[in-house]
Every structure is written in structure tokens, then in C-alpha cells.
Image (spheres, rainbow, N blue to C red):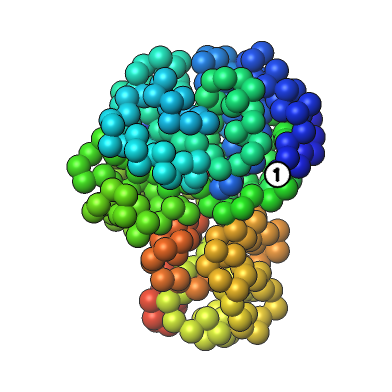
């Protein structure tokens, strides 16, 4: 069931209906400022289990607990006083912190860990739903496990269809990539996933942040850091290569081998039969990225190419997603391309 909802002034009837579904142990897909989430009442064991089931998410990959305030976060987690002050300044927003859990939620929410990931989304729809319920809502991105995260209600429908009790269509999401995740139980805090809240901004609040290779999408999972990292993510069916040299040259080389090529481009697109423009700047590119990956698979081409972007600001989040989507295929020089497609 899909209902439209104004993202800026959520219809109170839609909010009440969503809350009712959640109270009964159902699941609701709704936008956040990052991507669409698949939510359950955080205290409903049945609802939270249903999230895993509908998404086909392995049970050892915990959910994010979404709250409307630092006070609500304190009802499920221990928040040290210094962190409380920081969260009051950065929330609501695309920043998730991993903190010590109070152990009050169903075990499946945290996959049995003694920590919990919490965030206050900067989006009127989930905030209104949380306020209506008076308790947090737990959920991951509303995609089928292994697919790109959904940035529109159509993406949710495409992946999960009628297995979701209610899809609230609030239009396309604002940032288009998932929240930044920082584990603040460690000193220095460690970046688990780069997102719209950049490392440069984080460091203004937390001091030095450790950025492990896995957060850049370089290394394979270190399971000890974050359970979700060991799973394959954002992978289109069509092979995708990140190109660090002239994109036009890459297209020429691949086409010369008789391959049908699609180009994902930032700014000016090179001449090619299939182009998927990501936008003029990196924020637009982030916003359009997952839709572009979904479109890539529908073109029926042999290979997709995408330019490498600078790993700072939102660019770090983009490169992390691209590395996962490409299965770490990166061509630094033209010769690398030949080896990749051989
Ligand atoms: O922007 C977002 O974060 C979106 C919206 C819906 O809020 N949510 C999202 O959730 O993208 P998702 O599908 O990425 O799942 C939550 C991630 C997983 O990678 C999981 O492993 C990690 O958070 N996570 C959850 N609890 C954790 C914990 N206690 N320690 C480390 N990582 C944790
Ligand atoms: Mg996800």
C-alpha cells in the first residue's frame, strides 16, 4: 500500500496511520533526508523481525534506531555528557553514532551486540511518526539486501513491493546516500561509514577521527568494526569500473573492444551511446547515484564506467559507494582497463 505525503508538512492522517501500522507490529517504508528506511516500532520484536524478513537481511546485521531527540536516544543508550552536547548540535541530521546500549530493545535490533546505532533523522515525516508513537523506530534502508539503497518510493516498490505494510511516498530523498556512521565508543572515534556529514565537519566536533581503509571502501570487511560491512552492497548486475584517467579515452578503449558501454558522468559527459548524467557537482552526484546504478542495469550494456572523484567532503561517501558497487574494479591507467576486461 502506497500513500503520498508532503515531505515538508506531513499529513497528520498519514502519520497516524503509519504509527498504527507500527504499533500493530507492521513495517512502514518512509523517506529520511538520506535514503528511504524500512521501519518498525523499536520495542516490537515482531515488527523488527519483519524488517529482517522483508528485506532478506541477515540477522547478524543490526538496525539503526531512529529517535526524535537526544533524550529519546538516552532511553535506549548510554550517552556520555560530552556526546550529549555534541548531539544537541548535530541532530537532527545524517549522522549515526554507535554507543553503549541499555539493552532495553529486542535483541534482534542490535543483533545481540552491546552497542546500538542511533540517529535523529532531519526529515519531517519520520520525525512526526516517532513523535506520534513516543518511542524510537528501528530500521535499515528500505532496499532488498544487496541492492542499492532506495532514494524514491518507486525504488522501494521495485525491491519490496507489497511485502511492506505501508509505503509513505514523500518524493525523492535529499542527500541520496546513507548517514555517516561513527563509533564513538572508541578513542579516537572511528568512521564506520562515510556519509553526508563529512569527516571535515565531524572533526570540528570530535577532534581527530580515525578513517580506516574499509570506510573508504578499500578493504574488505573487518567484521569486528561493523557487522554490515561484511555483506556485499550496492552491486549492480552490470560490471562497473571506476576510472581515474580521461573518461573519454576509457570509453574509446572499451568500445574498440566491441563492448557496449554506459558512462556515469559528473559535470560534462563524454560522447558515448549511453550516458547517465549524475549532475553538475558532487552533492547532485550523491543524490542521483543509486538511481543511476539501478538504471545502469536496465540499459542492457556490457559495462559501466564512472569517474573517480576526490575523496574529501561528500566525495569520500561517493567513492566508498562506488568501490562497493564496482566490486573494487578501479582503472588507474589505461593499461588497467585492458586487464579488467581481458
Ligand atoms: O541514512 C541511513 O543511515 C539510513 C536511514 C534509513 O536512516 N539507514 C541505513 O541503514 O542506511 P543500513 O541499511 O545501512 O543499516 C544500518 C547500518 C549497517 O551497516 C549496520 O551494520 C550498522 O548500521 N550498525 C547498526 N548497529 C551497529 C552497531 N551497534 N555497531 C556497528 N554498526 C552498526
Ligand atoms: Mg542499507
Query: Does 27 sit left or right of 331 as displayed?
Result: right
Query: Does 77 sit left or right of 247 as displayed?
Result: left
Residue at (61%, 41%) from the top-left corner?
123
Tell which of 237 and 174 is nearer to you.
174
Reply above or below: 69 against 19: below
Image quadrant containing the N terminus? top right
Residue 189: where, in percent of width, then height? Answer: 26, 44
Res. 158 in view: no
Residue 39: where, in percent of width, then height? Answer: 59, 29
Reply above or below: 100 against 258: above
Res. 134 in view: yes
Residue at (38%, 28%) from the top-left corner?
116
Q: How many marks?
A: 1
Residue 99: where, in percent of width, then height? Answer: 33, 31
Q: Quadrant of ligand 1?
A: top left
Residue at (50%, 41%) from the top-left corner?
92
Reply above or below: 231 against 53: below
User: What is the secondary structure assignment of the residue under circle 1?
Assistant: loop
* Quarter where residue 259 is shown: bottom right
Q: Which residue is mark 1?
A: 8
Amino acid at each position: 500500500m502506497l500513500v503520498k505525503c508532503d515531505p515538508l508538512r506531513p499529513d497528520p492522517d498519514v502519520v497516524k496511520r503509519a504509527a498504527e501500522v507500527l504499533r500493530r507490529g507492521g513495517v512502514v517504508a518512509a523517506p529520511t533526508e538520506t535514503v528511504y528506511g524500512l521501519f518498525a516500532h523499536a520495542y516490537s520484536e515482531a515488527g523488527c523481525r519483519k524488517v529482517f524478513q522483508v528485506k532478506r537481511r541477515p540477522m547478524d546485521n543490526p538496525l539503526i534506531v531512529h529517535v526524535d531527540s537526544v533524550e529519546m536516544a538516552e532511553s535506549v543508550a548510554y550517552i556520555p555528557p560530552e556526546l550529549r552536547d555534541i548531539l544537541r548540535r548535530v541532530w537532527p541530521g545524517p549522522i549515526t553514532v554507535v554507543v553503549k546500549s541499555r539493552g532495553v530493545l529486542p535483541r534482534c535490533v542490535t543483533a545481540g551486540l552491546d552497542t546500538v546505532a542511533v540517529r535523529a533523522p532531519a526529515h519531517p515525516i519520520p520525525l512526526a511518526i516517532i513523535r506520534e508513537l513516543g518511542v524510537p523506530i528501528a530500521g535499515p534502508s528500505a532496499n532488498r539486501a544487496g541492492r542499492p539503497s532506495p532514494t524514491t518510493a518507486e525504488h522501494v516498490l521495485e525491491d519490496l513491493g507489497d511485502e511492506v505494510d505501508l509505503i509513505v511516498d514523500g518524493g525523492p530523498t535529499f542527500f541520496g546516500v546513507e548517514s555517516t556512521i561513527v563509533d564513538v565508543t572508541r578513542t579516537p572515534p572511528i568512521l564506520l561509514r562515510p556519509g553526508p556529514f563529512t569527516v571535515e565537519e565531524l572533526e570540528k566536533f570530535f577532534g581527530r577521527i580515525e578513517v580506516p581503509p574499509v570506510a573508504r571502501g578499500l578493504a574488505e570487511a573487518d567484521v569486528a568494526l561493523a557487522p554490515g560491512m561484511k555483506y556485499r552492497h550496492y552491486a549492480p548486475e552490470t560490471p562497473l569500473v571506476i576510472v581515474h584517467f580521461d573518461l573519454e579515452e576509457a570509453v574509446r578503449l572499451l568500445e574498440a573492444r566491441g563492448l557496449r558501454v554506459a558512462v556515469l558522468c559528473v559535470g560534462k559527459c563524454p560522447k558515448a551511446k549511453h550516458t547517465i548524467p549524475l549532475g553538475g557537482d558532487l552533492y547532485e552526484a550523491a543524490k542521483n547515484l543509486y538511481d543511476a546504478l539501478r538504471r545502469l542495469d536496465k540499459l542492457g550494456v556490457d559495462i559501466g564506467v564512472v569517474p573517480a572523484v576526490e575523496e574529501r567532503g561528500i566525495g569520500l561517501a561517493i567513492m566508498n559507494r562506488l568501490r562497493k558497487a564496482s566490486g573494487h574494479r578501479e582503472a588507474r591507467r589505461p593499461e588497467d582497463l585492458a586487464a579488467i576486461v581481458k
